[in-house]
Structure formats: structure tokens, C-alpha cells
Image (tube, rainbow, N blue to C red):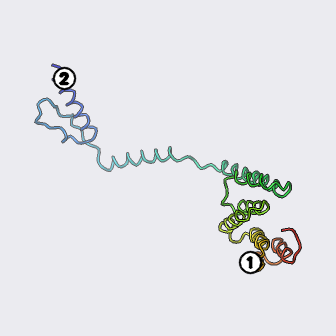
Amino acid sequence: MATYRTITLAAALLCAAAFVCGDARAVDSRDPVVTQPPTQAAPPAAKKEGIFKRLKKKFTRQKKAPEKKEPEKKSERQFIRGYRHAHDLIYKHKDYAAGIVALRALHRDEHPDVANLIGFSSRKLGRSEDAKIWYEKALAADPNHTRTWQYYGMWHLERGNRLKAEEHLEKIAGICGTDCEDYKSLKLALAGGGNY
């Protein structure tokens, strides 16, 4: 009796699975224990496709979050606020080490202004090779970043490489002309004046 129930239950599950999957042929009609599922016309392929398309659209709509501009703006405001704080630490308080920490905390090392200021602070702390790496990183992010060309020119000048500093001066002139602040500052340093 238990065996008959088990076979009947298994057959019913097999029939149900075959019916749900739309394959009535999976049921062997020669098996006396298995009964055929009720005959019901399978939905046409076009109708099935429509159902799947609707489900896909519904899933896509649920999965895709609406675009929000506010978090981007908030993130950008946080970056600017953090950058200003680091800028003040470096230029107003001459706390170069704290400035580097504040800049690295922004997690925007690829930003040319951030990389340039880390390079400047490193140079002021006597970390010459670190400064070079950061200046080059800033220029890789923005080859027209005149402040980096100015600071990198001063870095070369400190190393006694006047020719390289003059090349950087010409680069600045090509980008912003001879009246911009970065050009004037490096030119003054090359003339022997100014603090670099």
C-alpha cells in the first residue's frame, strides 16, 4: 500500500512537472500508474514571449534604481570642503604632513589638484622622490595643469636642473601665456627670487 502511494505520488509530481514545463511527452503513457495531465492548450510562443518580456521589464525596473543627482552633489560638496581644509593646512598653517593626510582621506588621488598638493607638501617635507611621483601623477591626469608644471619646475630648480625648469616655464607659457600667475612665479624663481 505504501509503495503504491509512493509510486502514485511520484507519478503525480512527474505529471505536474511535465505540465508546468509544458512538455506532456515527458510522461510515459504506457505506465499504468501514471495518468496523463489534463489536456490544455499550451500558450502560443508569441504569448509566452510577451509574458517573459513583461517580466523582464518589471525585473529591470525593480533592479534599476532611479538616478539620483543629490548624492553626487553631496559627494562633490564633501570633496570641495575636504580639499579646502587640506589647502588651509598646507598654505596657511604650513602643516604639510597633516595636509597630506587630509588629501589622502579624500580618496581622489587621481585628481590633479590633489596629486599636485601632495607633491608640493612632500617636497616641502624633503621627500623629493615622493614629490616627483605625485607631480607626474597630476600631469598624467591633466597635462595642462599649470600649477603642477610650476611646482615641478621648482622641484627641478631645487635639484640644480635649470634647463628642465626652463622647459616647464615654456610649457606653462604655451598653456596660459606669460601673464598667468604660475608662469610669473616660476620665472621669478628662475631669476633667483621668490620662495620655491
Residue type, label 1? Lys
In screen coordinates, is 184 left or right of 137?
A: right
Instruction: Tell which tag, 1 or 2, sits nearer the viewer.
Output: 1
For marks 1 and 2, the one nearer the N-term is 2
As measured in the structure, the alpha-carbon distance from the residue carrying label 1 to the one carrying label 2 is 92 Å
Viewer-closest of 50 and 9: 9
- Name the secondary structure under disc 1: helix
Determine the residue positioned at 77% across, 54% down: 97
Q: Which residue is mark 2?
A: 5
Q: Is residue 162 left or right of residue 5?
A: right
Q: Position of residue 194 (x, y in %)?
A: 88, 70
> Which one is nearer the viewer's eye here, 189 or 4?
189
> Looking at the rendering, which quadrant does residue 174 occupy?
bottom right
Q: Say which residue appears at 89% left-offset and 73% top-offset.
A: 193
Tell me where residue 28 appears, x and y as whole percent: 14, 38
Check whether the beta carbons of the residues at disc 1 and disc 2 lie within 8 A of each other: no
Judge from the rendering whether residue 135 lies leftward or rightward of residue 47; answer left or right. right
Tell me: residue 21, above or below residue 152.
above
Query: Which percent across, then down, holds residue 158?
Result: 79, 71
Residue 145: % across, % down: 73, 69
The residue pinned by badge 1 equals: 164
Q: Amino acid at mark 2?
A: Arg
- The correct choice, above or below, for 180 with respect to 78 in the image is below
**Count of numbered marks:** 2
Q: Residues within 10 Å of mark 1 (few under 14, many from 20)?
A: some
Q: Quadrant of the C terminus?
A: bottom right
As displayed, is residue 142 above or below residue 89? Answer: below
